[in-house]
Structure formats: structure tokens, C-alpha cells
Amino acid sequence: MAQQHTKSLRLRLRYRFDHLVAGGTAALIGWLALACLAVVIPASTVLVWADRGAPTTLSGRLTAVWVSVGQTLKIGGAVGSPVYVLASVTLALVALLFVSTLVSLITTGINERIMALRRGHSTVVEAGHTVVLGWSDQILPVIGELVAANANQRRSAIAVLAPMDKVEMEDEISTSVARTGTTRIICRSGRTTDPTVLARVSPQTAKAVLVLPPAGETGDAHVVKTLLALDAAVPGPGDAVVVAAVRDTRNHLTARLAAGPGGHVLCVDDIIARLLVQTARQPGLSLVYQELLDFAGDEFYTAAAEGLAGRTFGEALLAFTTSSVVGLLRGDGTGVVLNPDPGTAITAGDRIVLISEDDDTAVPQDAAAWVEEDAIVTARPRTPLPERLLLLGWNRRAPLVLEQLDQFVGPGTTLDVVALGGETTLHARPEAAAVRSRLEVSFHSGDITDPQVLAKLDVPSYDSVIVIGEPAAGTEAATDTDAGTDDRTLVTLLHLRAIGGDAQRELSLTTEMSDDGNRLLAPAREGADFIVSGRLISLLMTQISENHHLADVFEELFRAEGNELYLKPVCDYVRTGREVAFATLVESARRRGECAVGYRLRARTATGPDFGVRLNPDKRERVRFGEHDWLIVLAES
């Protein structure tokens, strides 16, 4: 009963206090003044009456109480005539009000300044830094790769501008990118489509600007607006390399116009479709691109043609012992030429395009002495054979996959497509049926996550299987990062692994995924081919931002025409079963008009993080190859 009474009293007191606060500032000041007087006057009275040295008369003690109250409340406590006391109290109250107001203004100003810094509204004063505009699933891979690229620099900076809280961005980045080395990461909050806000990250003094596509159906439109805002913020040609990405092919041209002649715009759908097709026809190629695109190992660089002027491109292939030559950057302004004719002459203004560990490791050193003529064999070019391909799933990239397949495969190749809706997918995207001169396509309706549907397909009989992200029935994946799409892909892979195990056969699988974290959960063999859209585009953007000439390199690598990477049987180049220096394979490939850049050992595909892939080996390195090993070459399609 006593506890209930106490609780009730506490609730009534709280209610009255809330009512008091709701009364406004004047009422609150008045009640606080009364509360102070109610405490100070009795306390001062007790002090005076308890003081042995206090006056003995009543009037003297009342005067002492007044002095004590005045000193405690900072209103003077002057003694004298009533007019004098009133004037003294008035001046004290005015001074108190002035000081309180001044302190309040100073405190408010400091708080506003601190909040402005916390919100990330101050200007970044940097030069030669990298600016990242926007926030998406690509931001963390981009920052991680930029940190790796700047590892050999004494001082570097990355400025991120996104419509998010500054502290939240910093926390997420610090959680995912544990070590930044000498690179400082600066976050600023604001709209990337506002030219005045863009000035906060100083794009006019940056060496590169990366524009990331945000999630959602309007992501591409946001990229276009950001590029227009960047042009308004930095009028005229700037020194910064501008790299952007859009998802839908239909928005590619618009974004390129917004980026201007010096900008580089990647189309996610187009690149992913090309890689899916290339990798499906050449198992293991995704591992090669992963090694080539990240900054952890070897990547593309350009080096001055010192001492090579007047010599031929074929001679340059063996002129670098620890780097793999793949092309020329012409000094006449015609751009990059990959794998030119071996007899092409090198001029003094040219630069060598090569694969190397770093830009300072591309040092000329002749390796021709390591070539073993007796180990070189001459094999006839292999005629493309008809293939049986299986495509599981359907999304907006599927028509592009069909178009790319039609350009790559040999005559007589068949493709079976299993997707929700079957033939109705053709009505949704009529262009899927527009390019089938060599490719015979059959559509079948079925849920790719249903084991009974997969069991009827005789999956082991196909030469290659492509699994692409497909939304659930009755839904449509709005973004590349739709979680449900990856979930369905994981279920499909689980059933395919069981089918391969029952047939005692290793299925050739190429899988499209949105989230790299889901790839780690995938029930597939080690070293399997996964095309992770977000991470791949992040790697490409960072590579181009560090060297804008690489945009032409990747453009040729990812299209059906021109030169591209291949995994070819090593037995077509050298005798197997004996150790040979890698320089021998480079020379053998040169005689076939190709550039050898690495190899993949089948015996090691189930061990180690590289799964047998070795890019840019030392040309003096001796390797014993088997009949089923591959040579990685850059050759014309």
C-alpha cells in the first residue's frame, strides 16, 4: 500500500513538472526563481543565526541575510537606501542577463560549428586526391582497392561525398577497411547532384572522380545528374579522370554525353553479360580477371619505350623479364593497340602496355636467352565445335547474354533457357530473338530452384551451364543487390552440386551474383567461376581512375571483336612432361601472333587462393606442364 502511494505521488510530481515545462520560458524562469529563493533565503538565515560573529540586533541580522542572498544569487547584496538597493539589484540583473545571453550565444555557435563538422559540411582542402561520389554496395570495394593502389605512396587521400550521415559513413568504412596505411579517408555529407555541395570535396584539384550508381530504379538517372552537376562545378576541361557506371544499357549513351569527351562511363549490364559469355566458354577465366583487376597482384601499366625505339613489338615481348608485354600506347595519339602484329615498329613516342606487379617493376631486361627451341611445338588452330549450353534464370541482362553468345559461339551451338515464364520472356524483351543467326535458342518454363525441374534437364550432358540471378515469381528485382535474387541462385547451385555429385562429374558452372559475401556461401567447387557484378565494376573503376588509358584496354578485352584473353591447352605451345622456362611459351605464342601472360595448372586448381592461376610469371621461371594445363594468352578472337 505504501509502495502504491509512493508511486502515485511520483507520477503526480512528474506530471506537474511536465506541465510546468510546457508553460513556456517565462513561466519556467519564474518558477526557477521562486525555487532558488525558497532554498537560498532559509539557508542564508540559518548561516547568519548560526554565526557567532553575526550582529546581535534583528535589523543587523536581516541585513546580513540580505547580503548573503545577494552574493549567492549574484545580484550584489548592496546595503543602503531603497533607491540605491533597487538600482544595484537592477544593474546586477541586467549584467546577469547580458552575461547569460553572451554565454548562450557562444555556446550555441560552438555547438553549431561542432555539428557542422560532424555533418561533414566543411570543405576538403586537398590536391591530387581521389573523389568518390555516391554510396552503394561498390563503395567499400572501391575504397579498399584505392588504398591498395596508394600503398606505395607517402601521402594520399580519398574524399567521399554522399547523402548520408558523416559519422555513419566513417563507422562503416572503418569496420570494413581495417588498414588504410598512408591513405586518409575523408567523408562529407551532401547531395552529389548539387554543384555547390560538390565543391566540398574539391573536385577541381582531384586526380580522379568516381561516380557510383546508387541502388534503385532511378540510380542511372542520379548518375547522369551527378555528372551534369560535376560539369557545372568544374567548368571547362579539368585534369581529373572522371569514371562513372550505369546499370542499364539504354542509359549508357546519355551518361556518356553527360560525362563529356574526357569521361569514362562503364555499363554494368553490358560488361557482366560479356564476361558471363566469355567465362562460360572458357572455365577459369573469371579467376584470371580477378587476379588482373585487383591491386593485390599484377595489373596493367604503361612504361616508356626506353631502348626499344626502332625495334619491333615481337622483340619487345621478351624485353621485360618480370613484366608481360601486351600492347602499345601510340605516341601519335591513336590510342591503345593490344597485341599488334609482331612486326609493328615501336617509335620513340610510344609507351609499352604491360602487366606488372607495380609501375616501378616494369624494368627492361632481355629474356631471349631463356628460350628453348627444342621445347616449342607447332599446333594447328583448333576449329570451334558446336556446343550445348544451358542458361538458368532470366533478368534484364539475359537478352545481352544471348546477343554475346551469338557472336562468340561456333555454328550449330544450341542454348536451352529455363526461366519463370518460358516463352513469355521473349514478349517481355523482343530483342532477345533478334540475334540468333548462329545460336539455336529453346525456351522452357520452370522454376530453377525446383530440383524436379533441374532433374529433367540432364544437366551433366551440357558443355557449360550459366546461372544468372532471377527474382521470385510475381516480383521483379529492382536492383543488382536484390537479396532474394542471390538467395534463389544459392539454392539453384546447391541442387546443381548434388546433380554433379550423383553423376560423378565436375559441372562447368558460371554464376552471376550481386553480393560478394554471398559468393562465399555458394555450394560450388573451389575455383569455380563467379561474376560478382558490384565488385567487378568497382575493380574496373579503380583501375581506370589510376590510369585512364586502361579504359581502351578493357573496352577491347570485353568485346567480341578484337583481342581478348583465352585459356588454351599448353600442349599446343610446348612439349609437356618436362621443365621449360616461361620465356619459351612467350616465344611460342609470339609465333602464333599471341601474347602469353600466364598459365593455369589443373593439378593446383583445388589448392591455394590462386587455384592454379599464375599471371605474369618471371620469364626465367621453369615449370613442368601437363597435358591438361592451360596457357593464358591475349589473342585475336
Image (tube, rainbow, N blue to C red):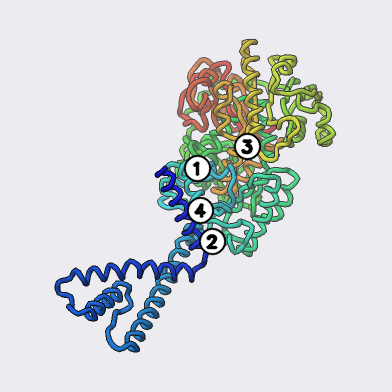
Q: Amino acid at mark 3?
A: Ser
Say what secondary structure mark 1 lies in: helix
Is residue 593 something one can see in this rendering?
no
Q: Which residue is mark 4?
A: 166
Say what secondary structure mark 3 lies in: helix
Q: Amino acid at mark 1?
A: Gly
Q: Which of pointers 1 and 2 lies earlier in the amino acid sequence?
A: 1
Lateral position of residue 158 relative to residue 499, left or right: left
Q: Which residue is mark 2?
A: 200
Nearer to us: label 1 or label 2: 2
Q: Identify the mark at residue 533; answer none if there is no mark.
A: 3
Q: What is the distance, in whole Å, between disc 2 and disc 3 at their CAs? A: 30 Å
Q: What is the distance, in whole Å, between disc 3 and disc 4 at their CAs? A: 27 Å
Q: Which residue is mark 1?
A: 144
Nearer to us: label 4 or label 2: 4
Q: Is residue 548 above or below residue 615?
A: below
Label pair 1/4, CB-CB below 8 angstroms: no
Nearer to us: label 2 or label 3: 2
Q: Amino acid at mark 2?
A: Arg
